[in-house]
Amino acid sequence: MKAVPQSAPTLVETVAAVITERIDGRQLMPGARLPSVRAFAEAMGVSKSTVVEAYDRLGAEGAIVARRGSGFYVAGKLRPLCLKAVGPQLDRAVDPLWITRQSMQAGSDLVMPGSGWLPPAWMPDEAVRRGLRQLARGAEANLVAHDQPLGFPPLRAQIARRLAEKGVEAGADQVVLVDSATQALDLLCRFLLEPGDTVLVDDPCYFNYHALLRAQRARILGVPLTPNGPDLAAFATLLAEHRPRFYVINSALQNPTGSTLSPAVAHRILKLAEAHDTLIIEDDIFGDFESEPSPRLAGFDGLERVIQIGSFSKTLSAAIRCGFIALRDDWVEPLVDLKLAMSLGNSHLSASLMHCLLTDGTYRRHLADVREKLGRAMAPALRQLEGCGLKAWLEPSGGFFLWMRLPDGLDSANVARCALARGLVLAPGGAFSPSSLSNRFLRFNVAQCADPRMVPLLKAALAECAAVRPLPATRGHVPGASSDV
């Protein structure tokens, strides 16, 4: 049977959809007055009768109400937050949550070079089981009660010691435990932001930053990224023009590009942030994959203007929900109050298990093994992808991400759709960036590239997209990066 093509929306439907999107995106809150019929008709370039009919339809649906002699207003009930409506209207294949959905729902038959975590076979499953058994046998194990407000003290002390190894001086009482780095960022957004505040992120950056910040009603601006960190000229301009509340950054092995801050860039970032009274949230979730620690903004700054967050989800286990926030002394108590109000604390069981794995040597041995495996996987994965016609933006010093440019004329969202139909889950660049130039990129996880099915499936997807819908060739580049990317 042939599919019946959908007709284009009418002018009335188009006008009604604009109002609906603004309500769903919370640009128009309950009780807000809508533009007059005349003003909205002029703004939309339609007749007044079209706007009248659109308002009537929305009134019949209960979305808006008319007040005689006053105009039209948004109805009193607040609709549930819809992240899709809050952000830019993207193709679902480049929606910031698309990659997470596909990776989490994927069965064992799918090939997942676009996923953001290590293969389960690489993780210390038996060591985790052993740690759980040890906790269960312990006479003093607390398996049923809440944790302390800041979190399990022995683990906080261990994290403080590990931070010191990277040049970040923080006492155990400056470390607040949470259940993940994502929860840490969410908590800090609630602590620091008011709706409408501006936040800077790298362009490109971890896609979930976009979704989380939109949920907090923040205004998001991207700082073009270079292989050594943010474009400093663009960073300075954005700071001066928009006075952002804070800047979120991966200093080491950035997601998705694998780039790492140089010392000179790190120093300049701090100087500019101080000059414009901007805070920095340093997400160090990939830092443990480095063989030798690179510069940390929190180390240079002494936790005065920089807040560092991290977790063990990428390095050890996504099931052990355990993260942390390291911050200045005078902010600890009010942040903990907010944490308790939101969640009544963090998982004591996860914290105790993590402490056990840190102190019995499991974590150290596991990281050494993973770094070795990643080192062996990086070059073969790069050769495979280059053999498919892709080009690396840079060759990272460690970690597991490669940021690969597609051949001219191809769009990452189209390639991702074609690949998924074949059982291949990719990470299209548009999910990581509002910049259209990132649509020419895919993020690959080298730890997930060893499956022999990947190359044939990727080549087939690339060939299909090149044959069906080629795009104009460009010489564009990621803003702030060298022109040969």
Image (tube, rainbow, N blue to C red):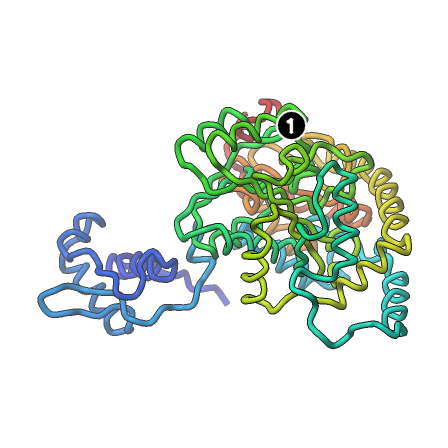
Q: Is residue 271 left or right of residue 195?
A: right
- Horizontal and vertical percent for residue 239? 45, 33
Quadrant hosting residue 382:
top right
Quadrant hosting residue 82:
bottom left
Q: Is residue 260 left or right of residue 125?
A: left
- Horizontal and vertical percent for residue 272? 52, 28
Above or below, 225 against 99 in this view is: above
- Label 1 neighbourhood size at 10 Å, few (<14), some (14-19), many (20+)? some
- Horizontal and vertical percent for residue 291? 82, 36
Above or below, 194 against 468 in this view is: below
Q: Residue furthest bottom?
A: 144
Q: Residue at x 51, y 42 (%)?
A: 246
Q: Is residue 119 left or right of residue 234?
A: right
Is 260 in front, or is 447?
Answer: 260
Q: Residue furthest left?
A: 69
Is 154 in front, or is 381?
Answer: 154
Quadrant hosting residue 375:
top right
Q: Amino acid at mark 1?
A: Asn
Q: Say if residue 336 shows up in the picture.
A: yes
Q: Residue furthest front?
A: 330
Q: Which residue corresponds to mark 1?
A: 228
Above or below, 271 against 303 in this view is: above
Q: Secondary structure at mark 1?
A: loop
Q: Is residue 49 left or right of residue 294?
A: left
Q: Say if residue 466 shows up in the picture.
A: no
Q: Residue at x 19, y 64 (%)?
A: 72
- Horizontal and vertical percent for residue 238? 45, 32
Q: Residue at x 58, y 43 (%)?
A: 281
Placement of the C terminus among the 4 image quadrants: top right
Above or below, 305 against 361 in this view is: above
